[in-house]
Amino acid sequence: MGKSSLSDAELWNSIKDDDYRAFTTLFKRYWQLLYKTALHYIKDPEIAEEIVHDLFFNIWRSRETLQIDDFKSYLKAGTRYEVFHRVKKIRATPITYFEELPEEMGSSVLNKGDENIHSRELEQELELHLASLPDRCRQIFLLSRKDNLSNAEIATQLGISKRSVENQITAALKYLRNNLKNIAIVIMLLRLLK
């Protein structure tokens, strides 16, 4: 039986046992999808290709310690994560140093600028994590937290039970809590929940 007929889980188990052919099979299976995902966000074919190669390289290098239950979801989330970091590096702006601060630029203006940049970075990271949620779960979470709809209103709007809405919001919050490493994002999320 050829490697291409094996499931992702079977291939992953072989990869953990240093089976390079199984790794090559998974690479061929998902490379195009991940490349298109990266290219969608980054718009640079060369960088998109680097992102996918780096992701697979890191998986191979960490194969003995990684726990991957759903390989496709892991790869898509990993690709978006890598894109986010590349975009962050690309958008990094040079810092201009002044001997003296111009009078029209008080320290409060500079602090607000720093706050705005930090806030945008946090929002981007939160959006990246929200994009990893299943579509229905993300939709319900945003209706609740962004549009401030009650669970009953969401249930009526989507034609589902109130309990389903509650379950989806709970699942989204649990996912975000488990995946958000930056405490500032958690603080921002808590502000959204008010």
Image: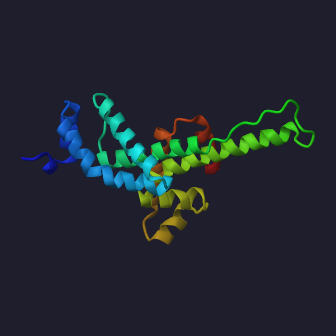
- Residue shown at the point (41%, 43%) measured from the top left: 50
Q: Nearer the viewer, residue 10 or 89?
A: 89
Display coloring: rainbow
- Residue shown at the point (46%, 69%) measured from the top left: 158
Residue at the outermost right position = 103
Q: Is residue 52 above or below residue 100?
A: below
Give how far across and how far down residue 178 sits, in percent: 46, 39
Does residue 4 appear in the picture of this structure?
Answer: yes
Give how far across and how far down residue 55 sits, in percent: 38, 40
Q: Nearer the viewer, residue 73 or 79?
A: 79
The quarter holding residue 164 reads bottom left
Is residue 56 left or right of 175 when viewed as pictured? left
Does residue 190 appear in the picture of this structure?
Answer: no
Is residue 130 left or right of 118 when viewed as pictured? left
- Residue shown at the point (46%, 57%) measured from the top left: 40
Give how far across and how far down residue 90 sits, in percent: 57, 44
Give how far across and how far down residue 19 sits, in percent: 18, 34
Q: Nearer the viewer, residue 144 or 36?
A: 36
Is residue 145 left or right of 70 when viewed as pictured? right
The quarter holding residue 17 reads top left
Is residue 2 left or right of 182 when viewed as pictured? left
Residue at the outermost front position = 46
Q: Total number of numbered labels?
A: 0
